[in-house]
Image: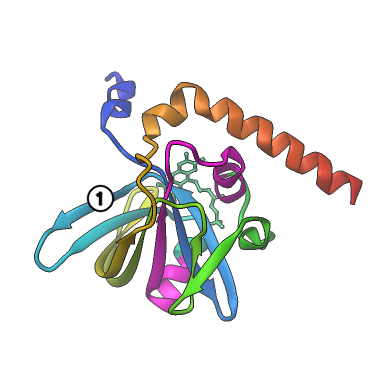
């Protein structure tokens, strides 16, 4: 099998937010898909080791911030290369709160989801959720996972290198 064929499935990049009591958590995800128009249902696939996944199970609510083509590369590194178990990721980026959920200030659109069911599928857990609210914030187009893989990723690595240097200095 040529598993790289699956990279040609078009996916976007999103910040999945939730909360652990009064602390916000979140991770970078690409596996989000709308699966029904009426009612509006989406699915989100979280790795079983993800702390955000545990908090989706615990609180049943989440935010999705859709990333634009001009996104700050640090955002993906911040949410995708470290865990909310040890880092307060939202303190590192501009964000706003609605309905006790965190949303990225620079996102192009936002979605609020309520978990309806979950199913463990191999390495991941698939959450089916109802869209309880959503809105556009910017005209900019969405970044794709393909763009991330083809070059953008290097900018993310660089941004994380710089970030880690600032941590060492502290
Ligand atoms: C580009 C990119 C896409 C990712 N897609 C997913 C995804 O769809 N689902 C997932 O659970 N993790 C995904 N990850 C990995 C998580 O963001 C990463 O494991 C994160 O550190 C989990 O943080 P947490 O423990 O705070 O939840 C992705 C990471 C990157 C960089």
Does the magenta portion include 72?
yes
Residue 89 % position (x, y)? 63, 58
Query: In the rendered view, would you say 67 is above or below 118?
Result: above
Q: Is residue 50 visible?
A: no
Is 140 or 69 nearer to us in this picture?
140
The magenta-colored residue range is 54-80
Q: Quadrant for residue 62, please give it.
A: bottom left
Badge 1 is on which residue? 33
Number of marks:
1
Q: Look at 26% across and 57% down and name the residue there.
A: 43
Is 117 or 76 nearer to us in this picture?
76
Q: From the viewer's perspective, tell me whether residue 66 is left or right of residue 126.
A: right
Q: From the viewer's perspective, tell me whether residue 162 is left or right of residue 85.
A: right
Is 4 or 140 nearer to us in this picture?
140
Q: From the viewer's perspective, tell me whether residue 47 is left or right of residue 131.
A: right
Query: In the rendered view, would you say 5 is above or below 83?
Result: above
Report crowding for label 1: few under 14, some 14 to 19, many 20 or more residues within 10 A (C-alpha).
Answer: some
Q: Look at 24% across and 59% down and name the residue there.
A: 42
Q: Is residue 66 visible?
A: yes
* Image quarter in which the N terminus is found: top left
Give the SS element for disc 1: strand
Does the magenta portion include 101?
no
Query: In the rendered view, would you say 116 is above or below 146?
Result: below
Q: Look at 67% across and 56% down and name the residue there.
A: 92
Residue at the far right in the pictured view: 169
């Amino acid at each position: 099998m040529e598993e790289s064929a699956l990279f040609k499935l078009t996916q976007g990049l999103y910040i999945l937010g939730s909360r652990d009591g009064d602390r916000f958590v979140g991770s970078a995800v690409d596996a989000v898909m709308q699966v029904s128009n009426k009612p509006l249902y989406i699915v989100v696939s979280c790795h079983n080791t993800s702390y955000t996944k545990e908090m989706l199970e615990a609180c049943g609510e989440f935010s999705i911030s859709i990333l634009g083509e001009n996104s700050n590369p640090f955002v993906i590194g911040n949410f995708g290369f470290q865990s909310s178990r040890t880092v307060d990721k939202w303190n590192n980026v501009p964000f706003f709160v609605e309905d006790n959920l965190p949303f990225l200030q620079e996102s192009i659109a936002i979605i609020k989801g309520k978990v309806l069911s979950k199913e463990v599928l191999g390495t991941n857990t698939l959450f089916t959720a109802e869209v309880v609210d959503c809105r556009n914030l910017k005209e900019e187009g969405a970044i794709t996972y393909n763009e991330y893989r083809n070059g953008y990723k290097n900018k993310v690595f660089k941004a994380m290198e710089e970030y880690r240097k600032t941590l060492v200095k502290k």
